[in-house]
Amino acid sequence: MDAISPITLNLGLLLLTGLIFGYIASRYNLPRVAAYVIAGMIFSPDLLGQLEWIEIGDWAAPLTTTALGIIAYLIGGSITLKQLRRSGKIIFTSAIGESLGAVFCVFAAFCLILPDTYALSAVQLALAFSAIAATTAPAGTIAILHQYRARGPVSNTLLGVVALDDAIGIVLFSLMMVVVVGESLALSMGTAVLEIGGALVLGILVGRILCQFGKIFHQGGLLLPVVLGHILLALGLAEILNFSPLLATMALGFSSRYFSRAAGGRMFIQVEYFEELVFLIFFTLAGAHFEFTVFVGHLDLIFVYFCARIIGKIGGAALGAAAAGASQPIVHWLGLGLIPQAGVAVGLALALGNNPVFKEVSTMIVNVILATTLLYEVFGPLAAKFALGRANELGVERGKEG
Amino acid sequence: MKVSEWISRFPGHIVTIHPEDSLEQVVDQLLAGPCVQDIYVVSGADLVLGHLSHKRLASLLLAEHRPIHTRRQIMERVVLGPAEELMEGEFVFARPDEELDDVLCRFVDHDLQDMVVLDAQGVLAGGINLNTVLREIRKRPNVIFD
């Protein structure tokens, strides 16, 4: 009993504090994400973390892996092949462009400024940061579109791109893990094929089985444990077989929806309720990793990551949209709507810390991603509103009619 | 009473649409009749392929008024497909040889107003309307199950 109580107590305190802070923030129209982080900070080593019974340690790793697996499953199942075909070239090339743009700019900037004083080489660290930079947070963008009743080609393209780019982000992150963790580039190429290909095959196989189980246990109450069981199965098998667990669960989501055809949507409805819980776990855990000295000591990295990712998103989205022959407003303003970064990025940063290769730099990575996420949380919605305004797609603000 | 006997005595009207119909066409069908809550997607050979509820259609039509979306809902909003992509392929139905008594709880469990009756090949054989059942129960509580 004594052995497990600190874990359950710590987790319970973390979640409840986060929920209460989030509730208070919502009441005053403040970002809930920031409230979750501040709640987590209370348990950081600088504050309550000094107490003997507060320990956010190794127990958090399987929790983060599972939570990220659930998100990857939802991302994989968010689109069907038919939707992908119908979404058109502009959304597809813009999503590829802005994801790769952010990756390239962050990688280049970090290669230039990172000193060789870390446990990893500058290139390895730059790869890690750049792989996280591809993801965006749809929630902030959706909130602005809703608040200002935005309509038009830029708004529509923006919606499609934010729904797609986390999938691209997870693929890039998985590739990065293979390259950085591999001992040499030549060896990495071989293991990359095995880890990526194996994960895809595993995800598709488990997705096929999930589809069959979904037909047998079709009632709502039974479907949830069936889906969660398959997510855990895919994660566990991927870890044992040294495949990418994120790609495996993303392939699981995509394939289970594909195999289930018209019944595919119900494989996700109940799991989608977990998304807020997962992000609550990510942000509070990340907040608990906050260290003031680490934060102050890496202000330069925070600033460079913040600027490089924005430049990459804007430039990449413009190039991607232009390549598909998009109209001028889309080419000019799409990128500014893609600034927000939140739960998936923080989850990926926490996942890096679970890998022994990143052990010594994990606190630094989490602190940089956390600080920039908070900055993006403030700056992102303002940028999206500005872009949609310049594209003449803003309507009357809700609550300010007449 | 068997379901087949019920549908011959009280033939319920099932609203059907084609798999290729757009959301707007489906909603027009929904609003054409009084109090239609359930629409069924039927192929050319009267094979029932799926179900669309009033709530599902309303949530699709009012998507831009929702402040929070899942990624799945975002894609659905951006690239809205025809009825066959919007429908629920796993749906509740009755067989003609079932006892009506065994079928009625499905209305409550699955929040249905009109339930399709399918033959062994999945072809539409008729429909049961919940209000008709309730009306008969109020008139003759013990008779309809005999």
Image (spheres, coloured by chain):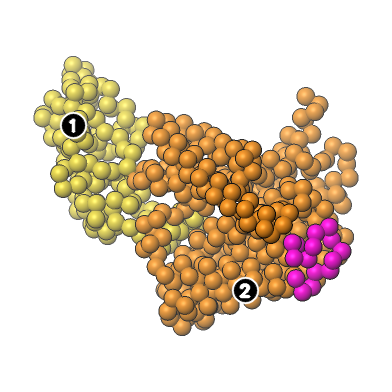
Tell me which corner region of the image, top left, top right, bottom left or bottom right, holds residue A131: bottom right
Percent x, y of residue B96: 18, 27
A114 sits to left or right of B1: right
- The number of numbered badges drawn on the structure is 2
Say if mark 1 contacts mark 2, CB within 8 Å: no
Judging by colour alone, the chain drawn in orange in this rendered image is A
Name the chain letter of the residue that bears numbered label 1. B
Whether residue A208 is in magenta: the answer is no
Residue drawn where x is 48% and y is 70% of the image: A93
Label 1 Cα neighbours within 10 Å, binned few <14 / some 14-19 / many ≥20:
some
Q: Chain of mark 2?
A: A
Amino acid type indicated by mark 1 = Asp
> What residue is disc 1 on?
B119
Please indicate whether residue A333 sits to the left or right of residue A183 in the image: left
Location of residue B126 (image quadrant): top left
Q: Nearer the viewer, residue A393 or A353?
A: A353
Residue A101 image position (x, y, % from top left)? 60, 72
Q: Which residues are magenta?
A: A111-125
Can the viewer see residue A22 in this picture?
no
In percent of the image, x 21 and y 45: which residue is there? B42
- Disc 2 marks a residue whose amino acid type is Gly
As drawn, the label of residue A312 is 2
* 1 vs 2, front mark: 2
Q: Element under label 1? A: loop
Residue found at x 67% / y 58%: A186
Q: Residue shown at 77%/51% (left/top)?
A: A357
Instruction: Give the color of chain B as drawn.
Output: yellow
In the rendered view, tell whether residue A358 sits above or below residue A207. Answer: below
In the picture, the quarter occupied by the N terminus of chain A is: top right
**Do discs 1 and 2 share a chain?**
no
